[in-house]
Image: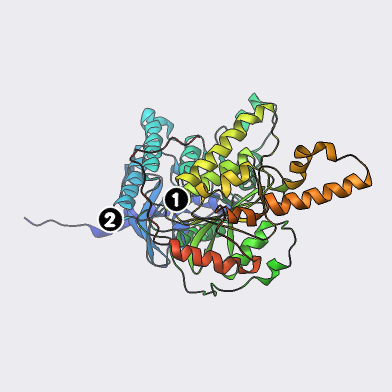
Amino acid sequence: MSVEYNLPIVRERKLAIQTGDPERVAEQKKLGKMTARERIGLLFDKASFVELDALVGRDGESGVVTGYGLIDGRPACVYAQDYTVMGGAVGAEHARKVIKVMDLAAKTGAPVVALFDSMGVRLKEGVDAVNAYASISAKTAQLSGVVPQIAVVLGQCAASAAMVAVQNDLVIVGESGRMFMNGPQVVSANTPDKVDAKSLGGAQACLKNGLAQLACGTDEEAIAMARALVCMLPANNLEDAPVDLTQPDDVNRLIPQLDQIDTVTDVKSVLAGIADNGKVLELGAGCAPEMVVALAAIGGRTVGFVATQPGVGEGALTAEGCHKAARFVRLMDCYNIPVITLCDSVGLSVANAGGQCQLARGCAQLSAALADASVPRIALVTGNAVAAAYMVLAARSAADMVYAWPGSVIAPLTVKAAVQVLMPGKLAGSAEALKKREELEKDYQQNVADGVNAAKMGYVDDVIEPSQTRQMLAAALEMLSSKRDSRLPKKHGNLPL
């Protein structure tokens, strides 16, 4: 018995599915947005995308495109909500396709890029639609720490979708993206805040409130950023941090401009001097500017920087800044990327009564994240490392190697505050008293607080010239590249979330 295949009909049906609703396509174009397949075409290397389950769903209307391809020659998986098919609404078939490609990523150790652009759930499916998002959320949680997951918000991403997006390791929001739990109408009707979709959940709003790590303009720019992130991260948790030697930069390069700085006011300039070719990708720039977290490379190998920003509140630790840094450290530890901390902080910020518990929790989160990390950890004190700032960012428990610049202060209080507390009776307002105070401060700096004293006691490995920072960090990274830690047996720690 012979079987006849009507290939033209199959091709015609598949083509109709891939084309999408013409009205929806026109709507996307009018808003300056790309279709799901156009976005995927930009994400992957030319002609490398392989679509999965194109015919799945009622008449193929699953509202999501899934598959795999190559990003700079490395395999990756994708699911892209297709607004041109039923508004990209999520239902049972939509979820099954997404979970299937995520399972493929888990089996093969490939990163997942998720492109969000959906009207929400398919109301006609009832509980099936609610369970669909629950299933995607659970699978995202299961893959966390196994393969990198990058969410790119290029349209509406509300309620359950926002929950799933934020579960990803990194979130990029494009200019057309809108991410929130309650929509602007609901917020405006039930609170004193009168907001629109952009002010509530636009790219800059999401960056400022910490929901996103990167904000971009067009779809093209957001997708290009996703490609860049995939290239900087290992494919999975069993690989080491990637090494890119296509743009070499001498690891022994000196940074003479750092020797000319008496006081650092912008730590970003220091990071640029340390990093290969001055290239640093800051994450979460609009949130908690007193703490800087960034990806870069030293000797071609990806590293993660965590640095206090002395130009903002003297680098004092805040709850929001510590939370931002703690999550970043956990991400680095998930994917075997070394962490370098730079500390120049006067200690804790002053929180009001209501903020005290949040400040304690934030500092505990960052301290626990660094102490628990098994990746190479290097600390550099560039100025003040006072009290909790030293404990969290530069203590021996938080780093495998600790360096300090000349003149660094490592102490329970700043020099001025310590002298004020220890010798109050000697600090009257006369000129003689002021001179005495200067002498006492100089003595306290040299004999108690200076980083050299910490080095003498073994808390600092070396006091280095600022210009030698890059070569010293590179040497430490090379030495620690084979680091192995023995840990107490446990399921997992209870991070103070």
Q: Is residue 71 visible?
A: yes
Mark 2 residue type: Ile
Mark 1 residue type: Asp
Q: Nearer the viewer, residue 2 or 389?
A: 389
Q: Residues within 10 Å of mark 1 (few under 14, many from 20)?
A: many
Whether residue 236 is situated above or below residue 416 in the rendered picture? below
Q: Residue furthest right?
A: 430
Which numbered dot is residue 333?
Answer: 1
Which numbered dot is residue 95?
Answer: none
Q: Is residue 216 visible?
A: no
Q: Nearer the viewer, residue 307 or 39?
A: 307
- CB of mark 2 within 8 Å of CB of mark 1? no
Q: Position of residue 163 (x, y in %)?
A: 48, 37
Which numbered dot is residue 9?
Answer: 2
Q: Position of residue 75 (x, y in %)?
A: 36, 61
The quadrant where residue 136 appears? top left
Whether residue 98 is situated above or below residue 71 in the rendered picture? above
Q: Residue at x 46, y 45 (%)?
A: 168
